[in-house]
Amino acid sequence: MAFKKTAAKYPGKIEEITIGTGDKAVKLGGEKDLPFLTETGNRPAVGVEITDTKPEDWEPLFEQIYGEELLNDAPRWAKFVQDNTPADFIYLSLASADPNGADRSVEECVATAKAVEEAVDIPLVIGGSKNAEKDAQLLQAVANALIDKNVVLFSAVEDNYKTIGIAGNAAGHKISGESAVDINLAKQLNILLSQQGIKPEAIVMDIGSAAVGYGFEYVASTMDRIRLAALGQNDTDLQMPIITNVANDAWSVKEAVFPEAEMPVWGDQETRGIDMEVATAAACLAGGSNAVIVRHPKSAETAAELISALTAEA
C-alpha cells in the first residue's frame, strides 16, 4: 500500500533563510508542516564536510577516496566536492585552529577560508575549532574577511555568541546557535542572539546530534518538541531552520571505525560507515533538520536521493 501524505494545518511557520550568493544560493526552511508531509517550504539540503588541513583523525579510507594531495589543499578539495558530489553546500571545518591541536593562527585559517570561498560557487558553512575562546576570534575574523558572502558561521555558543553574532550580522552572514540537545537551551540561545539585533531570518539552529543507536532518541525527541512548538504553538523563538552535522558522530562509533580485519563478521568498514552516516542523516531529516552535513561522498549521494524521493510530487 502506497504511503499517503496527511497534511495538518499549523499556526506557525519555519523562517526561510538564504545562504550563499548568486545562482547557487540555497534557501532553507519556509515549511508550514512537519517534514515531507506537504510541498510547503524548501527541500532540505545536503552539505559535505572538508577540513582546512589534512584531517589526521579521519579514517584512512578518506585518503583513498580523495588522495593525500587534495586533503592537503582545501580549495582544490572544495572544488572537487562541488564538481563530483551532489553537495548543496560545503562545510569547511577550521579544526586546525584548536589550541589543543595544531593551533594554527587566526590569520592562516582566514586565508584558507578566503581561498575556499573563491574556489567554489556553492554556499559555505564555516565551523571553528570547538574552543569557544579561539572561535570567538576566529569566526569574527572570518566574518570580516568574507563580508556579504552570506556564509553560515557554525556555531556560536553561550560563551562567545555576542562576539560571533555581532560580527557575523554586521558582515551579512547567518549565525548558527549551538546547543546540547535541549529545547530550552536552543530557545535561550536564539533569544540571546535576537537581543543582539540579529533577525530571525539570520539565525539557524545547531541543536546537536548523535549516531543512530547511540542515544539518538534524545535528539529525535528534542527535534520533535522544537518543531511542534514552532509550528503548533507558533513559538517564534524556535522557528529557525536546523542544520545538523552528523558526520563526526557517525564516523566515531565502532561500527564505522573497526577495520574489517578486526571484525570480519561485520563486513566492509567503508560500507558500514556510510550506512551509519546515511541512517543518522535520514533520521535527522525525518525529525526536522533543514540541512545535514555528511563526510562521505556516497552518503551525500544517498541522502540527496532520499530527499528527492520524499519531495517528489505523487
Image (cartoon, rainbow, N blue to C red):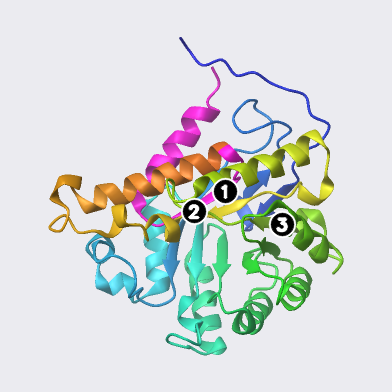
Q: Is residue 74 left or right of residue 173?
A: left
| Residue 42 locus on image (x, y percent) | 64, 38
Q: Is residue 310 left or right of residue 278?
A: right
Callout 3: 10 Å neighbours few (<14), some, many (20+)? many
Q: Which residue appears at 83% of the width and 47% of the height?
A: 236
Callout 1: 10 Å neighbours few (<14), some, many (20+)? many
- Name which of mark 1 and mark 3 comes first in the sequence: 3
Instruction: Assess whether mark 3 and mark 1 are in contact (beta carbons under 8 angstroms).
Output: no
- Name which of mark 2 and mark 1 comes first in the sequence: 2
Instruction: Assess whether mark 1 and mark 2 are in contact (beta carbons under 8 angstroms).
Output: yes
Q: Is residue 283 left or right of residue 134?
A: left
Q: Which mark is residue 219?
A: 1
| Residue 201 locus on image (x, y percent) | 77, 53
Residue type marked 1 = Val
Residue type marked 2 = Ala
Q: Classify 237 as above or below 90.
A: above
Residue 261 part of the magenta-drawn span: no
Between the residue at mark 2 and the residue at mark 1, the CA separation in whole angstroms equals 7 Å
Q: Secondary structure at mark 2?
A: loop
Q: Which mark is residue 210?
A: 2
> In the picture, residue 73 is in which quadrant?
bottom left
| Residue 105 locus on image (x, y percent) | 52, 90
Between the residue at mark 1 and the residue at mark 3, the CA separation in whole angstroms equals 12 Å
Residue type marked 3 = Ala
| Residue 66 locus on image (x, y percent) | 28, 63
Most foreground residue, 207 or 47: 207
Q: Secondary structure at mark 3?
A: helix
Q: Secondary structure at mark 1?
A: helix
Residue 299 part of the magenta-drawn span: yes
The residue most toward the top is 1
Range drawn in magenta: 287-314
Provide the residue designation for mark 3: 186
